[in-house]
Amino acid sequence: MKITIMDRADGEDDEIIIRCRNIDKQLLNLIYAIKSGQEKILALRGSEYVQVAPEDIYYFEAVDNRVFLYLDKEVYEVKYKLYELEELLCGTDFFRASKSYIVNLTKVKSISPAFNGRFEAHMKNGEKVMVSRQYVPVLKEKLGL
Amino acid sequence: MKKLENLLFTFVCVTSCVVFATAVYITIFWPQAKFGVEIIWQILSVSFLTSLGVCFYPKKEVSSKVALVRNILYYIYVNVVVLGCGIWFGWFYADNLPMVLGMLILIALVFILVSIAIWNRAKRMAILMNERLKGYQLKEAPDSESMD
């Protein structure tokens, strides 16, 4: 891949332009790396807002119209709806695991079968998240199955 | 498509188990009887009807409690279908307690065996998923892998 860095005119914003014939997985990863390097999720810790890097997040959970973000040991509230996060994190390591969960695949330690066609994702921090029957195809697709 | 695949898998498992159950049942209760080709069609019809139950499982998310209730309902459905067809095809006499008990025990055994087969299939899928997950994590985030 050829990399060209060009000078920009005064007053213009920095910009990354990708010229390609097809967007393959490698290119998608590159775009995600650029995007995730810039984008942080705004979360509420007590009364103060903090920025959290997506790669540090284990999963999001929706409980009674409130959405929480889970890190290794901490839990913050976010002001996004789960479907907004799903759109925001589309094409990244996150996948919708059920009606109430969005999970970071890089933080999943292992997957085991559960009752009635569901699967259980064992997180690296020891927690467990259920992948519902409805979203098992999403996980399979993410894993290339 | 996925539903059809699940239906076919369940049908194959149920039919295999029912053939064994039928052999056991005939050996115990009808040792002298001679059967025609109709018994094969009866087995296939009952297997198909009981397998149809997997289509009633909606994709909609439910709690573990509701899932358990659905499984119990499915088990009742299987019993009703097999016993109903059994009476219709003349496999047993409703007033013959050992025959009815034999049917109930065999239905329970087939149900357990098919459930084990379905569980094993899910287990195999989980093993495959874990292999892919390892590959995904090494490929997608080689640096963070070493940190976790």
Image (spheres, coloured by chain):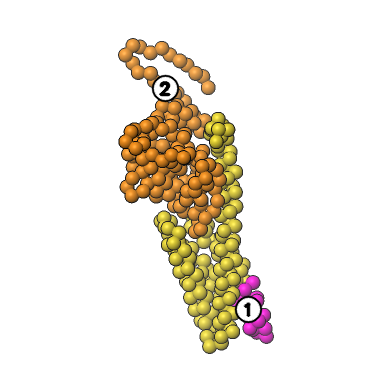
Q: Secondary structure at mark 2?
A: loop
Chain letter tied to orange: A
Which chain comes out yellow in the rendered image? B
Q: Which mark is residue A17?
A: 2
> A65 or B100: nearer the eye?
A65
Vertical position of residue A2 compared to residue B107: above or below: above
What chain letter is assigned to the residue under label 1? B
The residue indicated by pointer 1 is B25
Mark 2 crowdedness (10 Å alpha carbons): few <14, some 14-19, many ≥20: few
Q: Quadrant of the C terminus of chain B?
A: top right
**Farthest residue, direction front:** A46
Above-or-below relation of B128 to A57: below
Marking on residue B96: none
Residue at screen point 64% across, 80% down? B26
Q: Chain of mark 2?
A: A
Q: State the extent of the magenta-drawn residues as a range.
A: B20-40
- Residue B28 picture quarter: bottom right
Amino acid type of disc 2?
Ile
Q: Amino acid at mark 1?
A: Tyr
* Residue occupying the point 51% across, 74% down: B79
